[in-house]
Amino acid sequence: MSIKQLYQYSQGKRNLVILLLLVSAFSFSCKKDTTITSSSAKLSFSQTSVLFDTVFTTLGSTVQAFLVRNTHNQPITISSVYLAGNYTSPFKINIDGVPGTTFSNITVPANDSIFVFVTCTINPTNKNNPIVIEDSLMFTTNGNVQSVYLEAWGQDANFFKPNVFPPTGPAYCVIPCSSTWDSTKPYVIYGYALVNTGCTLTIKPGTKIYMHNNGVLWVNTGATLNVNGVAGHPVIFQGDRLEPAYQTVPGQWGEILLSPGSINNTITWAVIKNGTNGIECDTVGNSSPTLTIDHTIIKSMSNFGLLGQGTYITGNDLLIEDCQFYSLCLNIGGKYRFNQCTFTNYWSYAKRQTSLLYINNYYNDINNNVQSRDMDSATFYNCIIWGSSSEEVDLGQGGTGKFNYYFGNCDIETQRSIVAGVNYNNFCLQVDPGFLGTSEPPNDNYRVSNSSVMGQGTNIYGSYLLDLDNTTRKYPSTMGAYEN
């Protein structure tokens, strides 16, 4: 055989070997990609049940998701997926972006997974107590039937939705005059719910008010809000998402807005949480306090806890905590008195840029000119003002108006020198109160451990007999809202 013939023979043999290797690889690849059909091949799930906490009738839930996994080295085909409740089910399903109630022939690649998204909307039931809604999402694969259990707690509620749409300003609905809300069913507010001029809204113990996104309880000029909670049965204001993940998330709703000229508003034994502003109280309505508030917790606000705007507020046994800006903002003058309160701030969502307390007696108009507003008085007795910043008191004095403030028997986190006299008394402290738990809301605990703030409160400013735990206070008392 010539050299040329030998070369051609070797090249032909080489090409044959390459061809056989390619065929072999192709055959192996086809075998690997063949859908597995053995009855022993089952699906795996990231969770076997999906639970929705209380879902209000007609108001959809948030979306929950889980993974369906194929743990095998070959693709697997899910022949059917369906809700056992079929079209009557309150649950809605979306698989990898495709909505529906039944699905068929879904292929899951080898060692891969697909997402299943679930929501729930419950029809009105006219039942006052929560009801359990159950269903199952069924998966049939290679003759195997597997399921994921679905459960939701549903409750009927009183809904307030806008029905007045002015050309300017927010859309709102009007709450019937002289209304009384009780704890029979919760109340859900969309948009603005207005207590109109000359009307009073009274809220009884244990009532729960859930605010939809940007929802506002709006008390108009000449109107009055009376929140009448009692110890053990506070009135609760919060967002309408009740899943555990939302329990401490701020900014879920708007605020309680006490408009300029609203009168004789009272709030006692309430919890106000997870909004934008807890309470905004604007200007004076008559010679009485525009707002009298006691035994109330305001927490987790994306702006302010309690915002006073040139108004008249008295507050006793309050806890105002964890707001992005000021926990207590006393703006453009007014008259304020707080007794046995704890004002604190351990905002954990980002670095806080402000102190927790702001006292101010002016504003800048549209031409940037200073306009004075008298701070007639801002007095704090037996209070704790302490947080995560080294300076928690911002005194915004400007213009020519009065700027009167006074701390009596208080524990204050400030870098200012505290000298007994016009603004402080001899018993003001600058010591860490030793809060028992501030790291992870809602496990925050603002009872104190430092004995220095115990026995330092005095009744010369008035006696406040029950603390925020409904414990009888003994004087000399512990500073702040808790007697310990």
Image: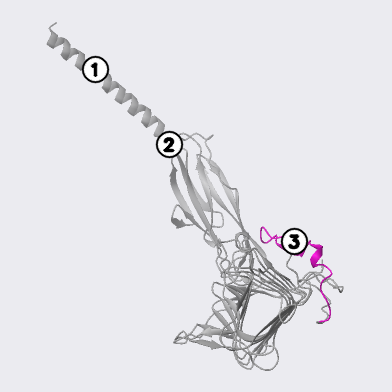
Which of the two discs, 2 and 1, labels the residue nearer the N terminus?
Answer: 1
Spot the residue most to the top: 1
Tags 3 and 1 in contact by the CB under 8 Å rule? no
Q: Is residue 458 magenta?
A: yes
Residue at which label 2 appears: 35
Distance Cα–Cα, label 2 vs label 3: 63 Å
Residue at which label 1 appears: 14
Tags 2 and 1 in contact by the CB under 8 Å rule? no
Q: Residues within 10 Å of mark 1 (few under 14, many from 20)?
A: few
Corner quadrant of residue 201: bottom right
Q: Amino acid at mark 3?
A: Gly
Give the side of residue 459 with respect to residue 36, left or right. right
Q: Residue at x 30, y 25 (%)?
A: 23
Residue at which label 3 appears: 434
In the rendered image, the vertical position of residue 142 relative to residue 398, given as above or below: above
Residue 183, x across and y down, in percent: 71, 76
For the question of whether residue 204 can be seen, the reply is: no
Q: Amino acid at mark 1?
A: Arg
Magenta residues (range): 437-460
Which of the two discs, 3 and 1, labels the residue nearer the N terminus?
Answer: 1
Residue 418, x across and y down, in percent: 71, 73
Which of the two discs, 2 and 3, labels the residue nearer the N terminus?
Answer: 2
Distance Cα–Cα, label 3 vs label 1: 83 Å
Task: Please name whichever residue, 225 or 436, is drawn nearer the observer in this view of the structure.
Answer: 436
Q: Secondary structure at mark 3?
A: loop
Task: Please name whichever residue, 305 or 90, is drawn nearer the observer in this view of the structure.
Answer: 305
Q: Secondary structure at mark 1?
A: helix
Q: Secondary structure at mark 2?
A: loop
Residue 327, x across and y down, in percent: 63, 72
Give the side of residue 162 with respect to residue 278, left or right. left
Callout in the foreground (2, 3): 3
